[in-house]
Amino acid sequence: MSTELQRLERLAERLRSLEPALPSPQARIRGLNLALAAVGTPQAARRQRPAGRFLLALAAAGAVLIVGTVAASADALPDSPLYPVKGLVENARGLLLFSPADRVSYHLELAGTRLREAEAMFGRHRDDLAEQALAGLAVEIKDAGTDINSLSASDLQAATQEEGRLEEAIQSHDAQLAGLQGNVTNPQALSAIQTARDRVQQTLSQTRSTVNSKGNPSNSGGRAKGSGHPSPSAS
Amino acid sequence: MRVFSRAAAEDDRPLIERVRRGDQDAAKELYERYFDRIYNYVYARLGRAEDAEDLAIDTMTRSLTRLDLFQDQGVAFSSWVYRIAHNATIDHYRKQAKASLVPLEGAILPQSADPSEIALDRIESEDLRAAVRELTEEQQQVLILRFFQDLSAAQAAEIMGKSIGAVQALQHRALGSLERTLISRKLNEH
């Protein structure tokens, strides 16, 4: 018979050998979006830019920040009086973005914001505002797709990379939208969610097709998921 | 093999300073450094992936947005995050009105049961996790921190607000309770 100490040590080893439980990729992305949105001031964390652009951004941001309500508007929801200010700040940020990759990041971030707003509005039974937020989500995704399409004309590799990010974001959003559909009973709201899901998927499909056709002109009908390079058989 | 590196091996202070200045890249790095660990910790306590994801997200959001509070704690950032996760777990249990604590410290081992007969390699991982969740609050915490999270006794002590000696004693008692729990579960199967 083994001693107590030996038995407990074996038990400890068995505990150590357990495979770690890991979160789903969707949860990682959802959490990251929420955490980053909560940290705020996204312009402070953008990639390093040339000094001229930085100063321009700083000056423009400073001008916007003169309005005392700007900071308070960052977390404003569509039913808040500060929400229009939030829209202005978002638009101002968009004006300061120059590279396609930055613009894609910007639109994906706003898409996440619109989705959270829709969730919050459904939670407050403001289905009308939730539907507007969902329409905004589809617009942001479409704008991201347009930027990727433009990028594919000059830098296919970067466009493929951005398309991967778009796809990842859409998968995450779609999972959340599907969850929303399970919690909503109003037929009009259900229809608005489905419309948003369809539009987002349509954007993904069109973006894939465009990027693929640029990489492989002989085949513009889409490509396998996750393959970021032209098919060798096309050459 | 564990996928989590030891929390204390990485210096979070430069990142924390950057997050305080609103640097989202730094916030992302801290998030990625801790999210999986915190999820693993909360999942071990709750046993439900969906709830664990929500609580891990809540923990990380709170950690990154309340760094002003962290300044006054006098502990490592990693310990602070685990404390937030621990408190979030307790809050969750309260909200769910669940009887999460089933103290087994006083449990009597059946006369006929021989502890050496437990075939540890035959115990399913989920059964082992479930048995851990039957322990007391502190026993669960010490086992999860030491063996699931692979933290040192000193790190576990800082997170739990105890001395290293107290953690080692608690760990010993927790393993004993876990052994008794496994035997009880095995006997109940028959």
Image: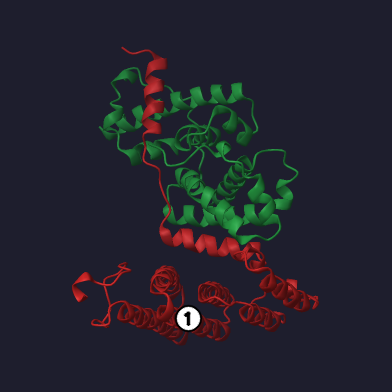
Chain colours: A red, B green
Q: Secondary structure at mark 1?
A: helix
Q: Is residue A116 left or right of residue A9?
A: right
Q: Is residue B114 visible?
A: no
Q: Is residue A221 left or right of residue A74?
A: left
Return the residue at label 1. Answer: A147
- Total labels drawn: 1
Residue drawn at (57%, 75%) of the image? A117
Quadrant in which the C terminus of chain A appears: bottom left
Residue B166 in the image, given as x and y percentages of width and height: 60, 23
Q: Residues within 10 Å of mark 1 (few under 14, many from 20)?
A: many
Residue B44 lies, with reference to residue B186, above or below; the image says below
Quadrant where the N terminus of chain A lies?
top left
Chain letter of the residue beneath label 1 in the structure image: A
Q: Nearer the viewer, residue B159 or A204?
A: A204
> Is B106 placed above or below B32 here?
above
Q: What x and y, as percent, mark residue A34?
A: 56, 64
Extreme residue in the left direction: A233
- B132 vs B75, nearest the viewer: B75
Residue at the image position 51 percent from the left and 26 percent from the top:
B171
Of A196 and A87, nearer the camera is A87
The reply to whether residue B36 is in sight is yes
Tell me which corner region of the image, top left, top right, bottom left or bottom right, holds residue B176: top left
Q: Residue A78 lies in what quarter of the image?
A: bottom right
Estimate the x, y position of residue A3 in percent, counting from the top left.
38, 12
Tell me if residue A43 comes above or below residue A86 in the rendering.
Answer: above
Q: Is A32 left or right of A200, judged from the image as shown?
A: right
What amino acid does circle 1 point to? Answer: Asp
Is B172 positioned to the left or the right of B181 in the image? right
